[in-house]
Image: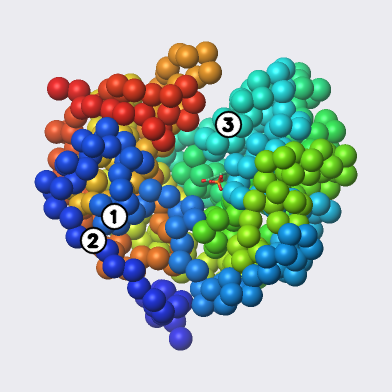
Amino acid sequence: MEFRTIIEPFRIHSVEPLKMTTVEGRRAALRAAGFNLFGLHSDDVLIDLLTDSGTGAMSRDQWAGIQRGDESYAGSPSWFRFLESVQELFPFRHVIPTHQGRAAEKILFGVIGGAGKIVPNNTHFDTTRANVEATGAEAVDLVIAEGLDPSALHPFKGNMDLAALESLLRSRAADVPVVFVTVTNNSGGGQPVSLENLRGVRALCDQYATPLFLDACRFAENAWFIKEREPGNEDRSVREIVQEMAALAHGMTMSAKKDGLANIGGWLALDDDAIAEQCRNLLILTEGFPTYGGLAGRDLEAIAQGLREVVDHDYLRYRVRSTGYLGDALVAAGVPVVRPIGGHAVYIDARALLPHLDPLEYPGQSLAVALYETGGIRACEIGTVMFGKHPDGSEHAAPLDLVRLAIPRRTYTQSHIDYVIEVCIDVASRAAELPGYRIVEQPKTLRHFTARFEPVA
Ligand SMILES: Cc1ncc(COP(=O)(O)O)c(C=O)c1O
């Protein structure tokens, strides 16, 4: 049967109430939070699109796994089920469980980073960049030029610029401990990376004897795009495509809060025995024993089951199509968004929508605040607030000022998304009236989480 509507491939089993709020109440909440949406009480948020990380709904079988969780300190059966699930897709020799993705990054860069080193990536996610820089190393982003142009229609805008990578490796290979590729490229619009590009990166890594690691948070969505868009892959299973992505890499960091379909968890996996041993030693200091890392046995079970569900084609078709549904509606209404629409989120181009604001007046922050004030929707600025401040204390415009509407997995229905579309179109119609913001308080790093703002009169 071929009908146009792609339905959610599940029915609802338990429900969570949403609290309806008023514009006055939301204005008061914004003032109390210093106009930083991370500072809100989430009870005061109607539709929470701040992140797709750890916010998805678990399945019946994942909850059953939670009941089965075995909390033995060492060698729990839950650990072995987790290990089997991870290695079925990513057959690396060493799998090191962590409480989330950034813990894997901290451990890995703690071992292979350091002053004088340089780490290329298509685009570093904020915690990845921060963890590289915290060791004194430099993080460079080498995504293809189309990846920085919000309106360029390229099927794999997350691809690495191979010429730029080659030029870096030619001059600095000895200082490059690892080449990273983020799939999908979250900070660049949730755009996928092609298998062809991954093969090209791997060939350069081989030529310069440098390991290739995946930041694999959204590996299944990336593989679905490969299946849909990369010739020769249409008849392959997502599982097979993921296994090929893994075979091209020497290791990975992972946040199971995305395509692990779990609310917490992550891992570091790699083939190198010596580095793995050093990483495990750090793991014991900060996370826990190597068969649970930072996780309870029940979390390991939820991830083990989530990894089986996430490569299901009906799930991925619905997932990518439902994100596209929101994006297509905004495009049709003339709201500037990053195109093509990514896998986990729709990114509004706030710099294009609010051209009256300088990037240092934070157009993304302004738009995100307006979406909350107007309709109780919480989105996330991915722009100059997040990336504009540098380790030397200077501040520059980020390459893009985006507002990300991240869609939690299996959580909101089509009518929730229809409401989001209405609110976005209403705010966009008043874009010229939205104020700029200035920062009145900020920490040294990762300022977007805790900075306080005020509107510029
Ligand atoms: C591409 C990417 N890498 C790393 C991370 C960090 O993962 P976690 O939030 O689990 O620490 C994220 C989280 O959003 C991400 O999107």
Q: Type of residue at label 3?
A: Arg
**Ligand 1 - quadrant of the structure image:** top right
Query: Residue 203: in sight, yes or no?
Result: no
Give the camera-side residue of 41 and 404. Answer: 41
The residue under the point 36% across, 61% down is 325
Q: Type of residue at label 2?
A: Lys
Q: Relative to residue 456, is residue 265 depicted above or below?
A: below
Image position, residue 183 (x, y; %): 60, 48
Which residue is tagged 1? 43
Categorize mark 1 by other alpha carbons within 10 Å: few (<14), some (14-19), many (20+): few
Which residue is tagged 3? 129
Identify the disc placed on residue 19: 2
Which of the two discs, 1 and 3, sits closer to the camera?
A: 1
Image position, residue 166 (x, y; %): 73, 28
Note whether ligand 1 is within 8 Å of mark 1.
no
Q: Type of residue at label 1?
A: Asp
The residue under the point 39% across, 32% down is 450
Image position, residue 352 (x, y; %): 30, 34
The Cα–Cα distance between marks 2 and 3, rounded to whole angstroms, is 36 Å
Note whether ligand 1 is within 8 Å of mark 3.
no
The residue under the point 55% across, 56% down is 264
Judged left or right of residue 244, residue 40 is left
Q: Are marks 2 and 1 in contact (CB under 8 Å)?
A: yes
Judged left or right of residue 172, residue 404 is left
Image position, residue 231 (x, y; %): 63, 59
